[in-house]
Amino acid sequence: MSVETGTTRAQDPEEREQQSLSTAAARNLATTTKTRPQMQAITSRWLTRMLPWVNVAGGTYRVNRRLAYVVGDGRVSFVQTGAQVQVVPAELTELPLLRGFDDADVLKALAERFTQREFEPGQAIVESGGRADHVYLIAHGKVEKVGAGPYGGEAVTGFLADGDSLGGRVLAGAEGTWDFTARALTPTTVLELPYPAYQAVAGQHEKLREHVRRRRADEDKSLNKSGEADLAVTSGHTGEPTLPGTFADYELRPREYELGVAQTVLRVHSRVADLYNDPMDQTGQQLRLTVEALYERREYELVNNPDFGLLHNADFDQRISTHSGPPTPDDLDELLSMRRGTRFLFAHPRAIAAFGRECNKRGIYFTPVELDGHHLPAWRGVPLLPCSKIPVSAAGVSSVLALRTGEDDEGVVGLHQVGIPDEYEPGLNVRFMGIDDQAVISYLVSTYFSAAALVPDALGLLENVETARANGS
């Protein structure tokens, strides 16, 4: 026992001798508790989870439909040189009476007859009751269609945006009048074709005149509200009248969906696979993360693929634009009213937040629904699910998808093939590709998929959804 006398001073803690084993050294003898590799890019993938998946044994899925005769106004594309805008000649076949016309020279001559006009907000492009003698193409801007309200006032009946058209049926004759007023809501660029200018081109090309007459004859057939040939049925009769004969015609060239593919090659060094598998299988963890990345890409393609992606396959008659920019309860009500049995709404999380702000302004609150154990926002009982794969433009503009799903309900379905060689999960396989001279093991990881809307009204789209927060909100 040591004893110190005299004046003592407190010993600096850093100068004290170590009394026990440090934790840093002790860790060398301990087994750490570790997680498996984490991945930030994994999302909820609600779209993939909610789609009913159909097994496509032959790799191709054919959608047979009844023959439809109605030709609606499609979207027209333009080219811009400075402030000058011109319509792409081949895009004129999106007009109802030019659908299927294939003479490029005639279309070019017709495109050259369009002239450009600019309209300010509030300015009328056409007036209700005025003579319908022009075809109008909306190159840029937003236009509202206004008709007579039930009590004498005005009522907004629809909106037009980039690529839409007015008066496509004027080509059959200029005897009619406009039954609505089209008014610019934003600065709007329009290309217009007067009926006399069309006549000048049609007068030189009998093929064009005959095509327009034939398309007009198709439109004059007795059709149901979906554009299919009406089935002749009689009811309420007595006695023994002669019953009408009928049949349901089919499309001669039904659309076929071939399965798309997302693939990558996973490489693992044999030394890693042999020596570093305790406590976790290195190859298994590499494969798990690779599969997650492929599934993320699969959902992106289901939304954005130009061939089968849902954004590109929404029928033009099933697309509407927001009334004022942000998504409002009125917009979603209109979107739901366009189809029976909407099962799901999908929107980017920023669009859902924008809709929430609009609801808050009106004192309206989401009614949550339970789905797969999750409490999720819903509108009119339809789950409003996040989908980060729906793009948001640099200006903060996005879209909202509305889906009816399932084959039995003539809805939207996902397509894949199960039972493929070396299957790892349904529709996904992992195939050994060998070991190269650097002892690197390679695996080909593939997933095959597509999506199909069985009838046009199974899929709807709310466009021009502004997600940015307005000043003061």
Image (cartoon, rainbow, N blue to C red):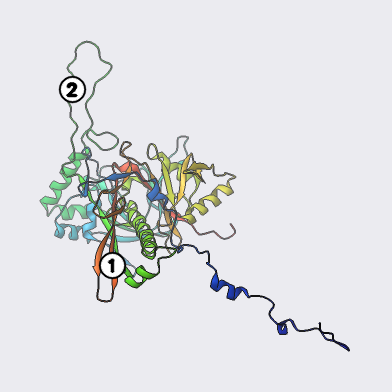
Residue 398 placement, left or right of 190:
right
Residue 244 image label:
2
Q: Position of residue 363 (x, y in %)?
A: 60, 45
**SS under mark 2:** loop
Mark 1 → mark 2, Cα distance in angstroms: 67 Å
- Front in this rendered view, residue 311 or 86: 311
> Residue at (23%, 31%) from the top-left corner?
230
Q: Is residue 152 above or below residue 83?
A: above
Query: Are circles 1 and 2 on residues that touch, CB within 8 Å?
Result: no
Look at the image and tell me whether residue 77 can be seen. Answer: no
Q: Position of residue 1 (x, y in %)?
A: 81, 82
Residue 166 image label:
none
**In the rendered picture of this protein, how many numbered marks are placed on residues?**
2
The residue labelled by disc 1 is 442
Q: Quadrant of the C terminus?
A: bottom right
Three-letter residue code for mark 2:
Pro
**SS under mark 1:** strand
Q: Position of residue 200 (x, y in %)?
A: 17, 55
